[in-house]
Amino acid sequence: MINKEIERKFLVSQVPESDLVDGVLFRQGYIVTNNKVLVQVSVSDNQGYFTIESGKKDRGGQYFSYPIPVDQAYLMIEQLTDSDDKEHGYLHTADDISIRIRVADDQAFLTIKGPRIGLSCLEVEFAIPMIDGVSILDSVADAKQIHKMRYTKMFNGFAFELDVFDLNNKGLILVEVELEDENIEVDTYPEGWVMKEVSDKKYSNSYLALHPYFKWEEKPKCLIVS
């Protein structure tokens, strides 16, 4: 699936405990490309492929390859790599590109996000086998993972996705609201929710994986109230 993700992110300083129902546990990690981990997109015989290589095959390395629609492959090569070859390119996470593995509700997804411009970024996501998702998460993705419970509440036409973080980010609560247009404002919140919009990169999940909340010198207070 190819998306143009447009979202607003909010820091939650207060949320009623009664709204924390039917949550889903999200476990996710991020692949960091380097000389040991290579991520490439290619096109062959009118078929796209997304490939992850970790280590040398003859030394116990891992190799994952997934067929993807050819239009996805061409778009990623064009917009997310610096390749001159229209049918092959490597992704570099140092270029504000994130490669996320997420396991939630007995499903696994691989998500690639391009550099964020304002509230928008290119997003490509596809499902992968659960066994691959767990394997990549535990062995290829950076060891620092994100664990959070997500609760979704519909209010005033918006889906408020509330994330209550755990482990190294325990104590932090954020809300994401996906939009159809960057100019849409979210200025009314569910009853009892106290929120402040944040655009700082440090509130992104990829940043929190490497710079967890428990290490912050100044920690905003996020409360669950009865």
Image: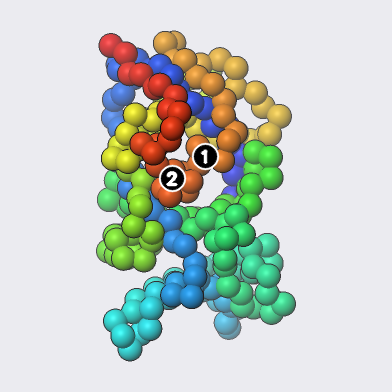
Residue 211: numbered disc = 2
Residue pointed to by mark 1? 202
Tell me where residue 213 sits by quadrant.
top left
Q: Nearer the viewer, residue 110 or 196?
A: 196
Residue at horizontal 52%, vertical 55%? Answer: 98
Tell me where residue 192 sits by quadrant.
top left
Residue at horizontal 32%, vertical 41%? Answer: 168
| Residue 190 pos. (x, y %) | 46, 15
Compared to residue 27, the image places residue 67 above or below, namely below
Tag 1: Cα neighbours inside 10 Å, few (<14), some, or many (≥20)?
A: some
Mark 1 and mark 2 residues within 8 Å of each other at the beta carbon: yes
**Hey, what amino acid is under mark 2?**
His
Compared to residue 95, the image places residue 67 above or below, namely below
Nearer-N-terminus badge (1/2) = 1
Residue 103: tell me if it is visible: yes
Q: Which residue lies furthest to the bottom in this view?
A: 58
